[in-house]
C-alpha cells in the first residue's frame, strides 16, 4: 500500500509538472505566438470567448500567481477553451471525439507486438543459437532502425498505392455512418491494418530482445536446474518456470508502451491521416491552435500517467517482493 | 584516460577485465566491425559532400520526377532536384544533429547520474524525481509542443531533442554509478579526502566507460531518428537539406501517390543504415562487456550446461 501511495504521489507531481509546463510555455516563449494567433482569428470570435482564451494563454495583465491558480482551476474543471481551427467546438469535445481512434490503433498494435514479441523472445532464449535466436534479432533490429513514419510511407506506397489491398487514409470510408454493423466494423478493420502493422513491425524487435535477455538470465537460475532434475516437460519449464519469472520487465515496458500508444502513434497517424489525437495535435500546431495543442498535450500526459499507475497496481499483484517492503 | 584504463584492473580485478581487452574485443567483433565500416562510409560522404556535389543541392537541375537513370542515379524530385545530391548533402545535417544531440544528452546524463550517485540523499531524490518525470512525459508530443512554441531553426531542433532525450541516459548512468559508488576504492578516495569532482570524474566515471559509450550510441540513434521525425512533421528548419526534410518534401509533393518511390526511399534507408550500424556497435559493446550475451563457442556438446557455467 505504501508503494502504491508513493507512486500515486509521484504521478501527481508529474502531472503538476506538465500542467506547469503548459502554463509557462505560451507565457515565456519569444515572439509572442499567441498574439499572432489572435490577430489571425479575432474577427470570428465573440468578445467573451477572446477574453477566456486570453486568460488561458496568458495574454493578460494580472499577476502571474493569480493566472497560475486560475489556470490550474480551469484544467481540473475541464475548461480548456474553444478550438481555433475547429471553431467554435470546445477543446474537450474535439479531444473526446478523437481519443478512441488513437486507443484503438495504438492498443491493437501494442497488444499484438507485445504478445508476439515476447513469445519470440521466449523461444529465442530457450533455444539459444537456434534459428529464431540467430536469424530474427538482426532482422528485427534492422527493421526497427527505420523511422516509424518511413516504414509507414513504404507500407502505404506498397500495399496501398501499388497493390491497392488496403485503404490508405482515414479510419473509415467517407460517408459510412459509424454504427455497430459488420460492414462498418470490417471497414474500420481494413483501415486499421496498415497503420497497426507498421507500428508492430517497428516495435516487435524491442520486445523480443528485452524478453530474450531477461530470460537468458532466468535460465541460469537454480530453480530451472531443479525443474529439469525433477524431469518436468521442457515446455512447462520454459513457460511456467522461466518465462513467467522473466515477464516482470516486460510488464514495465508494457506500461511505457501504453504511453507510447497515446503519444507515439503520432507519426503513423499523420502518414495515414488517421483521425487520432496525434494527427489532431499536428493539425493544431499547423493551424496555430494553441488551446487545442495544450488540451491535447495534457490529455496525452494524463493518459500516460494513468496507464503507468495501473501497471504499478498490477506490478504489486505480480511481484510479492514489492508488497513485503 | 590512459591512466584510468591502466588503473582499472587493479581497482576491480575480480569484476572486470582491463579495458584494453574491451577495445580488442570490440575490434575482433564482427558486428562492431560491420557497424563501424558503415559509419566510416557515411561520415566520409558527409565530409566530401561539397566536393562530390558542388553547389546548392536543392537547386533545380532537371525535369521533374525523373526515374533513376545514368545521369541522375536516384532520379529527381517533383521539383526537379537531384535526389542523390539531396541525400548526400542531407547526411551532413542529420549526422551533425545526431552527434550533437547524442553528446549533449549523454553529457547531461553523466552529470545528473554522477551527482545523484555520489551525493545521494536529498540531491539524489530530487534529481531522480526530475529524471523520472521527463522519462514519463510522452516524448513525441512534448517535442511537437516545444517545437511549435519555439522559433524554428536548427538550434531549436537540437535544444528540443536534448530536453526530451537526456533523461533516459541519466537513469542508466545513475544506476551504474550507484553500484560503483558502493565499491571500496571510492570509499577509500572519500576517506583520503579527495574532492567530490575528482572522485566523480576521475574515480567513478572511467569505470563506467563502456556504459557511457552504449548510452552515447543510443542517444545518437535517438537524435537522428527524432530529428527526422520532427522534420518530417514540418517542425524543423524547412530550409536546410537533411534526411528528415527530404522526407517532408517527398510527403508534401505527393511522391507516394504519384509512385515516385525513388524520392522517399534513399533518405529513409540512410537513416536506417546509420541507426542500424550504431545499434550493431552498441550490441557489440554489450556482448563484449556482458559475457552472458556472448555467443557460446562450443554449443554442440551440452549447450545448457556451458551456458549456465558461463553465466555464473
Image (cartoon, rainbow, N blue to C red):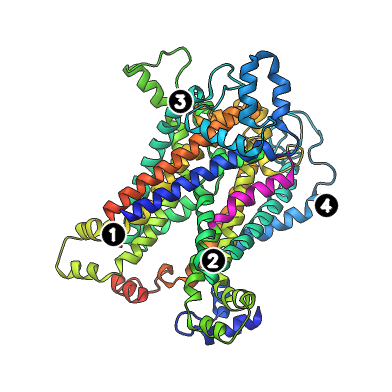
Disc 4: which residue: B51
Magenta span contains residue A195: no
Observer-side mark, 2 or 3, equals 2
Q: Percent from the top left, x then y, of residue A94?
A: 51, 23
Disc 3: which residue: A96
* Pointers 3 and 1 within a single chain: yes
Residues drawn in magenta: B149-168
- Mark 3 and mark 1: Cα distance apart in space: 39 Å
Which is more toward the observer, A163 or A25? A25
* Pointers 4 and 1 within a single chain: no
- Mark 2 and mark 3: Cα distance apart in space: 41 Å
- Mark 2 and mark 4: Cα distance apart in space: 47 Å
SS state under label 3: helix
**B155 vs A193: above or below:** below
Q: Which chain does the residue under circle 2 lie in?
A: B
Q: Mark 2 or mark 4, which has the lower sequence index?
A: 4
Observer-side mark, 3 or 4, equals 3
**A8 vs A101: above or below:** below
Checking the image for residue B116, the label placed there is 2
Asked whether residue A153 appears in the rendered view, the answer is no
- Label 3 CA crowd tier, 10 Å (few <14, some 14–19, many 20+): some
Observer-side mark, 3 or 1, equals 3
Considering the whole magenta stretch, tell me its main secondary structure. helix
Q: Which chain does the residue under circle 4 lie in?
A: B
As drawn, the residue found furthest toward the right would be B55
* Pointers 2 and 1 within a single chain: no
- Mark 3 and mark 4: Cα distance apart in space: 54 Å
- Label 2 CA crowd tier, 10 Å (few <14, some 14–19, many 20+): many
Disc 1: which residue: A245
Amino acid at each position: 500500500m505504501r508503494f502504491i501511495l508513493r507512486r500515486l504521489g509521484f504521478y501527481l507531481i508529474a502531472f503538476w509538472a506538465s500542467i506547469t509546463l503548459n502554463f509557462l510555455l505560451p507565457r515565456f516563449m519569444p515572439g509572442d505566438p499567441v498574439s499572432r494567433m489572435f490577430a489571425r482569428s479575432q474577427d470570428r470570435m465573440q468578445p467573451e470567448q477572446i477574453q477566456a482564451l486570453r486568460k488561458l494563454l496568458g495574454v493578460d495583465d494580472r499577476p502571474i500567481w493569480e493566472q497560475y491558480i486560475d489556470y490550474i482551476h480551469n484544467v481540473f474543471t475541464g475548461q480548456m477553451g474553444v478550438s481555433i481551427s475547429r471553431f467554435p467546438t470546445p477543446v474537450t469535445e474535439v479531444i473526446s471525439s478523437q481519443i478512441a481512434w488513437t486507443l484503438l490503433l495504438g492498443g491493437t498494435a501494442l497488444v499484438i507486438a507485445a504478445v508476439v514479441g515476447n513469445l519470440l523472445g521466449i523461444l529465442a532464449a530457450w533455444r539459444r543459437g537456434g534459428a529464431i535466436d540467430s536469424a530474427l534479432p538482426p532482422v528485427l533490429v534492422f527493421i526497427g532502425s527505420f523511422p516509424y513514419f518511413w516504414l509507414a510511407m513504404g507500407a502505404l506506397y506498397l500495399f496501398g498505392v501499388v497493390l491497392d489491398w488496403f485503404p490508405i487514409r482515414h479510419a473509415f470510408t467517407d460517408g459510412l455512418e459509424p454504427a455497430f454493423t459488420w460492414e462498418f466494423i470490417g471497414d474500420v478493420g481494413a483501415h486499421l491494418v496498415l497503420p497497426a502493422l507498421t507500428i508492430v513491425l517497428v516495435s516487435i524487435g524491442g520486445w523480443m530482445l528485452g524478453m530474450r535477455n531477461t530470460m537468458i538470465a532466468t535460465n541460469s537460475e537454480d530453480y530451472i536446474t531443479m525443474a529439469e532434475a525433477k524431469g518436468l516437460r521442457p515446455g512447462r519449464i520454459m513457460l511456467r518456470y522461466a518465462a513467467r519469472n522473466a515477464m516482470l520487465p516486460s510488464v514495465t515496458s508494457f506500461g511505457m508502451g501504453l504511453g507510447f500508444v497515446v503519444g507515439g502513434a503520432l507519426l503513423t497517424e499523420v502518414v495515414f491521416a488517421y483521425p487520432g489525437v496525434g494527427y489532431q495535435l499536428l493539425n493544431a500546431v499547423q493551424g496555430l491552435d494553441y488551446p487545442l495543442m495544450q488540451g491535447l498535450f495534457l490529455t496525452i500526459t494524463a493518459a500516460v500517467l494513468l496507464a503507468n499507475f495501473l501497471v504499478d497496481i498490477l506490478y504489486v499483484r505480480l511481484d510479492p517482493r514489492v508488497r513485503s517492503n | 584516460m590512459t591512466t584510468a584504463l591502466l588503473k582499472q584492473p587493479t581497482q576491480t580485478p575480480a569484476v572486470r577485465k582491463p579495458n584494453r581487452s574491451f577495445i580488442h574485443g570490440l575490434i575482433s567483433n564482427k558486428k562492431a566491425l560491420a557497424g563501424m565500416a558503415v559509419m566510416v562510409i557515411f561520415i566520409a560522404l558527409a565530409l566530401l559532400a561539397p566536393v562530390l556535389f558542388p553547389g546548392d543541392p536543392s537547386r533545380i537541375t532537371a525535369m521533374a520526377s525523373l526515374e533513376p537513370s545514368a545521369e541522375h542515379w536516384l532520379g529527381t524530385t517533383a521539383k526537379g532536384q537531384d535526389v542523390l545530391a539531396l541525400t548526400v548533402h542531407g547526411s551532413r545535417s542529420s549526422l551533425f544533429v545526431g552527434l550533437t544531440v547524442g553528446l549533449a544528452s549523454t553529457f547531461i546524463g553523466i552529470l545528473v547520474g554522477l551527482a545523484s550517485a555520489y551525493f545521494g540523499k536529498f540531491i539524489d531524490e530530487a534529481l531522480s524525481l526530475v529524471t523520472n518525470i521527463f522519462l514519463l512525459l510522452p516524448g513525441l508530443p512534448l517535442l511537437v509542443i516545444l517545437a511549435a512554441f519555439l522559433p524554428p531553426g536548427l538550434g531549436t531542433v537540437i535544444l528540443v531533442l536534448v530536453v526530451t532525450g537526456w533523461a533516459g541516459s541519466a537513469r542508466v548512468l545513475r544506476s551504474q554509478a550507484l553500484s560503483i559508488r558502493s565499491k571500496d576504492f571510492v570509499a577509500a578516495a572519500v576517506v583520503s579526502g579527495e574532492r567530490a569532482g575528482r572522485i566523480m570524474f576521475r574515480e567513478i566515471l572511467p569505470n563506467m566507460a563502456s556504459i557511457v559509450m552504449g548510452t552515447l550510441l543510443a542517444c545518437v540513434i535517438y537524435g537522428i531518428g527524432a530529428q527526422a521525425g520532427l522534420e518530417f512533421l514540418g517542425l524543423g528548419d524547412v530550409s536546410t537539406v537533411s534526411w528528415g526534410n527530404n522526407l517532408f518534401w517527398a510527403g508534401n509533393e505527393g511522391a507516394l501517390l504519384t509512385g515516385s518511390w525513388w524520392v522517399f526511399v534513399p533518405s529513409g534507408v540512410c537513416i536506417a543504415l546509420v541507426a542500424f550500424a550504431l545499434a550493431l556497435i552498441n550490441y557489440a559493446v554489450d556482448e563484449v562487456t556482458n559475457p552472458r550475451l556472448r555467443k557460446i563457442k562450443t554449443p554442440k556438446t551440452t549447450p545448457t550446461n556451458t551456458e549456465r557455467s558461463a553465466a555464473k
